[in-house]
Image (cartoon, grey):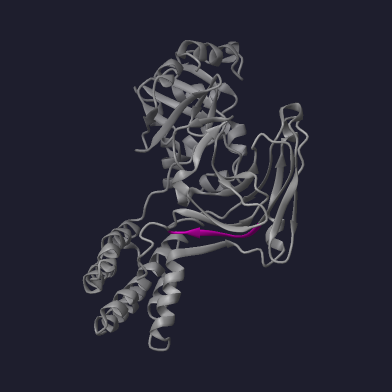
């Protein structure tokens, strides 16, 4: 474990920006950013957000400043979109996520596990192999002085966690209360909880459901209230809740899709079929079935050749499955091979685990994940064993994915809604051929799994 003084010395001894070119402590933080020459995008963002005045104030502040290169790693068009007036609120929150009240030099940061930002969020800190990590960013240049604080240059933009919509909180609370009651044999009480939540959703303006959608949902609630079977009633309410949750996850704040689903009427569908359909929607989401060969083309290999190793890896398809095979070599300090894919935002929202159906060769593999499409300073993974030549199902809770950087475990966990990429990774420190066949990948909900309504 590197000592605080040793780490501080390393950070200050070899900054990306020459020390002779650093601004003086007589300048405020915005002036420091302007004179650095590496923070032009950040300066533009701070100006557009109207935060330059606040950051010129007495403070003191600690700013984790993404360099121009860090902003360039964001998906194309992201910066331009954030600088649009309509996205000002989002931009302000992102920038405040990089600012901490008080002056914290590198030595102070090394001694902490996390810091609270002006956005009301938390940034985890870690010292790994002579590097200071702030969340998934590496500090490139530490302790740039300013008259009202200190600036640390970092190599990526830190995205704050999503703010949970009030309607989502309302619905999740209803399900967390109603599900156990239903499972304990009291569907009537569960139905009452769901009905109360849905009535609140259509009565409160702040939940973002359009008036027309509210009227449609209200009409459907009246129909459900007249049902005599408590279980069917609970199921019907739950289908509306699931539709609303889906609409929120997809950014449809007015929830037109939810309104259509809620007013579809269950009379034309047998009750058992409606229940089965709702159960499937609530319990899982197919991410990859590989019935279409184009799904396999979205994946790419990343081998130890990027570090001088000699391992190989190939991706192919075989009758509705994808095959990842090759050979691991321990030469040149190698030994790993992986296949990776980017995922749409929010694909795992509302689910808490990844379910795999795979056939392996008896070797151990790892399921990996990242919280953003851009390559980060840390990833999350969990190992799973295979049985040679046998199809098995593996369910890995997202909460069990451990955060690692350069082989060292770090604190922190991956939230399902932030999962943006998946990886199959072999690194069992063994040389030889490997073969992993993947039939399907699902997002599943394991908490309260016995509840189907």
The residue that appears at 47% across and 26% down in the rendered structure is 126
Q: Nearer the viewer, residue 104 or 182?
A: 182
- In the image, taking residue 439 as reference, residue 197 lies left or right, namely left
- Res. 169 visible in picture: yes
Query: Is residue 427 covered in magenta?
Result: no
Residue 54 versus residue 241: which sits nearer the camera? Answer: 241
Residue 172 drawn at (x, y percent): 33, 59
Q: In x, y percent, where is residue 130?
A: 55, 19
**Label total for image:** 0
Q: Is residue 235 left or right of residue 145?
A: left
Identify the residue shown where x is 43% and y is 17%: 105
Report the side of 373 relative to 253 (left or right).
right
Placement of 69 over or under 93, stated as above or below: above
Q: Say whether residue 87 is visible.
A: no
The image quadrant that residue 366 belongs to is top right
Q: Is residue 443 magenta?
A: yes
Query: Residue 329: horizontal and vertical position, in percent?
Result: 75, 35
Which residue occupies 64% across, 57% down? Answer: 390
In the depicted view, which residue is nearer to us: 6 or 84?
6
Measuring from the top left, give residue 382's x and y in whole percent: 53, 43
Task: Please tell me whether residue 357 is drawn above or below residue 119 in the rendered image.
Answer: below
Q: Main secondary structure of the magenta part?
A: strand
Q: Nearer the viewer, residue 164 or 43?
A: 164
Residue at figure coordinates x 44%, y 64% from the top left: 283
Quadrant of the image for the C terminus?
Answer: bottom left
**Left or right of 361 in this view: 381:** left
Task: Please give the range of residues in magenta.
Answer: 438-445
Q: Is residue 96 above or below residue 112?
A: below
């Amino acid at each position: 474990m590197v000592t605080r003084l040793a780490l501080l010395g390393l950070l200050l001894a070899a900054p990306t920006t020459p020390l002779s070119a650093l601004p003086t402590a007589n300048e405020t933080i915005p002036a420091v950013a302007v004179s650095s020459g590496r923070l032009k995008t950040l300066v533009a963002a701070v100006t557009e957000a109207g935060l330059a005045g606040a950051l010129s104030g007495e403070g003191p502040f600690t700013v984790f400043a993404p360099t121009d290169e860090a902003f360039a790693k964001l998906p194309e068009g992201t910066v331009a979109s954030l600088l649009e007036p309509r996205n000002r609120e989002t931009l302000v929150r992102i920038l405040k996520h990089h600012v901490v009240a008080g002056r914290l030099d590198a030595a102070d940061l090394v001694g902490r596990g996390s810091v609270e930002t002006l956005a009301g969020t938390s940034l985890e800190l870690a010292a790994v192999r002579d590097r200071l990590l702030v969340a998934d960013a590496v500090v490139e240049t530490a302790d740039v002085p300013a008259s009202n604080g200190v600036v640390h240059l970092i190599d990526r933009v830190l995205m704050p966690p999503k703010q949970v919509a009030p309607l989502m909180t309302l619905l999740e609370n209803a399900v967390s209360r109603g599900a156990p009651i239903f499972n304990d044999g009291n569907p009537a009480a569960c139905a009452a909880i769901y009905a109360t939540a849905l009535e609140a959703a259509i009565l409160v303006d702040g939940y973002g459901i359009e008036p027309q959608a509210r009227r449609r949902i209200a009409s459907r609630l009246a129909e459900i209230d007249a049902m005599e079977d408590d279980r069917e009633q609970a199921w019907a309410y739950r289908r509306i809740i699931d539709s609303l949750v889906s609409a929120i996850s997809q950014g449809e704040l007015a929830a037109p899709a939810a309104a259509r689903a809620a007013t579809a009427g269950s009379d034309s569908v047998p009750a058992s079929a409606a229940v089965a359909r709702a159960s499937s929607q609530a319990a899982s989401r197919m991410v990859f079935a590989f019935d279409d060969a184009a799904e396999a083309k979205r994946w790419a290999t990343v081998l130890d050749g990027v570090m001088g190793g000699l391992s190989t890896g190939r991706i192919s398809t075989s009758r509705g499955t994808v095959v990842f095979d090759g050979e691991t070599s321990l030469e040149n300090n190698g030994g790993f091979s992986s296949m990776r894919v980017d995922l749409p935002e929010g694909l795992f929202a509302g689910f808490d685990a990844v379910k795999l159906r795979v056939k392996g060769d008896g070797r151990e593999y790892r399921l990996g994940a990242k919280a953003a499409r851009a390559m980060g300073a840390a990833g999350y993974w969990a190992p799973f064993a295979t049985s040679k030549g046998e199809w098995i199902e593996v369910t890995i809770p997202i909460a069990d994915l451990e955060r690692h950087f350069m082989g060292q475990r770090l604190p922190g966990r991956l939230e399902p809604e932030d999962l943006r990429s998946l990886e199959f990774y072999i690194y069992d420190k063994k040389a030889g051929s490997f073969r992993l066949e993947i039939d399907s990948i699902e997002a599943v909900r394991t908490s309260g799994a016995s509840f189907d309504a």
